[in-house]
Image: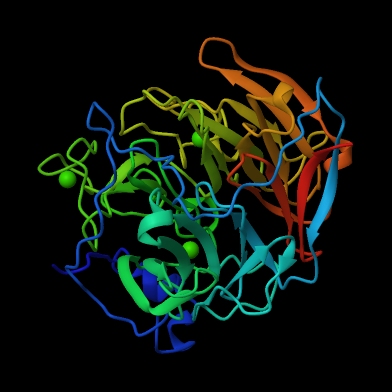
């Protein structure tokens, strides 16, 4: 089976590729096995045949830390977990696992174990050469397989040396759980890019056990390539694939599967740059921070029971407005944002950083509260959302403000973290 490649639209790559293909030759990491038909373990299923995502940890997994819940809605503060990191962009944990894994944009996955950043990286991947905070390329996303504790498989999203999107599978070492096996590299998906920005970068397993992948519109202001509404390209989309057999297969109920016009991999479309998004681990609802152009930042929310194929509006709409201050655009059939804020407003900003619905152990009265931030304005806010009532209880958290927030993260217990790219820190959200 060949790994599908999504080509850029003819001409665009030459016009907008910025010569990035000259940066290097060898994409990917490890030994770079290209295609392989080796099947991976099929996800465990429940009585209805649906894959079980929150698998129990392996019997010999170390225990999660003891949790001491606080009562009431606490004032929130930040606890420094790690410092002196080199442009960190994400933090996460495998299910049931007390360790934290931190992504550095230049290609390293670092392991925090018992509160200490381990000197040996878990894995280092050869990614696009990035040297600035504003470079949107590099190592961007990490998702552990729901059965990671037993199959050791995980998936990364990075921009390679040709500045294209790569989704790859790796496996942790069978002999040492604190390092990955670089030779286990398997290419899952490759998507040609057209410009260095708007790459998306998030991937995660949904409650259905499938791998979701967020890819930005490719780049260029105002989606000049018009990828967001083009169902024949992967850019400007959230994709959904089944990685039970590599490189992947298409879930039968994907909205554009088979003869239905449109790429089989597309789950939803009309995204500009879905940089950070998450599934509520209790409800399965999907919260997407979609970065705006010049005017509006938004969080769109897809209920767990929503059908695939929804159109989130870009580049016709930016937030719940016609793009670029125009009027009279056709908003029919496009999903409005659940929450938006003006870049020029107060508190304002430039780039929404989508976070998580808190489902942790420590602060039970915060359950159901969704956190988000802005990359430029450094604020952190939260809200609650329901399908019937929409967004309520928007709250500012001055104790969580820090520089250059690039991402949130969630550990196995559901506790939340903030990644400060400029300060090189991972910080935990804790009660004051
Ligand atoms: Ca791009
Ligand atoms: Ca199709
Ligand atoms: Ca939208």
Query: Which quadrant does the C terminus fall into?
Result: top right
Is residue 13 positioned above or below 60 on the image? below
- Which residue is situated farthest in the front direction here? 60
Left or right position of 379 against 296: right
The percent coordinates of residue 84 (x first, y second) are: 80, 71
Comparing 84 with 118, the one in front is 118
Q: Residue at x 81, y 47 (%)?
A: 377
Comparing 64 with 406, the one in front is 64
Residue 18, visible in the rendered structure: yes
Residue 325, visible in the rendered structure: no
Left or right position of 62 against 352: left
Comparing 2 with 136, the one in front is 2
Is residue 362 positioned above or below 231 on the image? above
Using the rendered view, name the quadrant where residue 5 is placed: bottom left
- Which residue is situated farthest in the top direction here? 388
The percent coordinates of residue 86 (x first, y second) are: 72, 73
The percent coordinates of residue 215 (x first, y second) are: 43, 54
**Colour option used:** rainbow
- Which residue is situated farthest in the left direction here? 259
Is residue 112 positioned above or below 207 on the image? below
Query: Which quadrant does the N terminus fall into?
Result: bottom left
How many discs mark residues in the rendered view?
0
Q: Residue at x 87, y 30 (%)?
A: 75
Is residue 263 positioned above or below 10 on the image? above
The percent coordinates of residue 95 (x first, y second) are: 50, 47
Comparing 345 with 242, the one in front is 242
Left or right position of 34 against 16: left
Left or right position of 382 against 397: left
Q: Residue at x 68, y 65 (%)?
A: 88
Q: Residue at x 56, y 53 (%)?
A: 93
């Amino acid at each position: 089976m060949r790994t599908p490649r999504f080509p850029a639209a003819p001409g665009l790559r030459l016009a907008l590729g910025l010569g990035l293909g000259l940066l290097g030759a060898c994409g990917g990491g490890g030994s770079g096995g290209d295609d392989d038909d080796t099947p991976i373990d099929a996800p465990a299923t429940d009585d209805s045949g649906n894959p079980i995502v929150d698998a129990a940890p392996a019997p010999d997994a170390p225990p999660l830390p003891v949790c001491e819940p606080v009562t009431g809605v606490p004032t929130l503060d930040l606890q420094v977990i790690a410092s002196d990191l080199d442009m960190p962009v994400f933090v996460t944990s495998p299910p049931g696992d007390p360790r934290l894994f931190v992504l550095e944009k230049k290609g390293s996955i670092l392991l925090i174990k018992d509160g200490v950043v381990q000197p040996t990286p878990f894995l280092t991947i050869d990614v696009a050469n990035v040297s600035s905070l504003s470079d949107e390329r590099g190592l961007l996303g990490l998702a552990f397989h729901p059965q990671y504790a037993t199959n050791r498989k995980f998936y990364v999203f990075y921009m390679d040396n040709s500045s294209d999107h790569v989704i790859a599978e790796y496996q942790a070492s069978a002999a040492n759980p604190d390092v990955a096996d670089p030779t286990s590299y398997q290419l899952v998906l490759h998507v040609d890019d057209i410009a260095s920005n708007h790459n998306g970068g998030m991937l995660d397993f949904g409650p259905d056990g499938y791998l979701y992948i967020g890819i930005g519109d490719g780049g260029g202001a105002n989606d000049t390539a018009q990828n967001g509404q083009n169902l024949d390209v992967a850019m400007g989309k959230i994709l959904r694939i089944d990685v039970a057999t590599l490189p992947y297969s298409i879930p039968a109920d994907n909205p554009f599967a088979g003869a239905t016009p449109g790429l089989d991999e597309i789950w939803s479309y009309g995204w500009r740059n879905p940089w950070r998004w998450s599934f509520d681990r209790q409800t399965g609802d999907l919260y997407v921070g979609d970065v705006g152009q010049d005017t509006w930042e938004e969080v769109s929310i897809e209920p767990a029971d929503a059908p695939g194929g929804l159109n989130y509006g870009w580049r016709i709409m930016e937030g719940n407005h016609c793009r670029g201050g125009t009027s009279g655009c056709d908003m029919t059939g496009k999903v409005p944002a659940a929450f938006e804020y003006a870049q020029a407003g107060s508190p304002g900003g430039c780039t929404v950083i989508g976070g998580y619905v808190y489902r942790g152990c420590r602060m039970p009265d915060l359950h159901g509260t969704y956190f988000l931030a802005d990359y430029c304005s450094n604020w952190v806010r939260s809200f609650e959302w329901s399908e019937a009532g929409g967004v309520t209880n928007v709250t500012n958290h001055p104790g969580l403000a820090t520089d250059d927030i690039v991402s949130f993260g969630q550990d196995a217990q559901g506790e939340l973290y903030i990644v400060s790219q400029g300060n090189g820190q991972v910080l935990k959200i804790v009660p004051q």
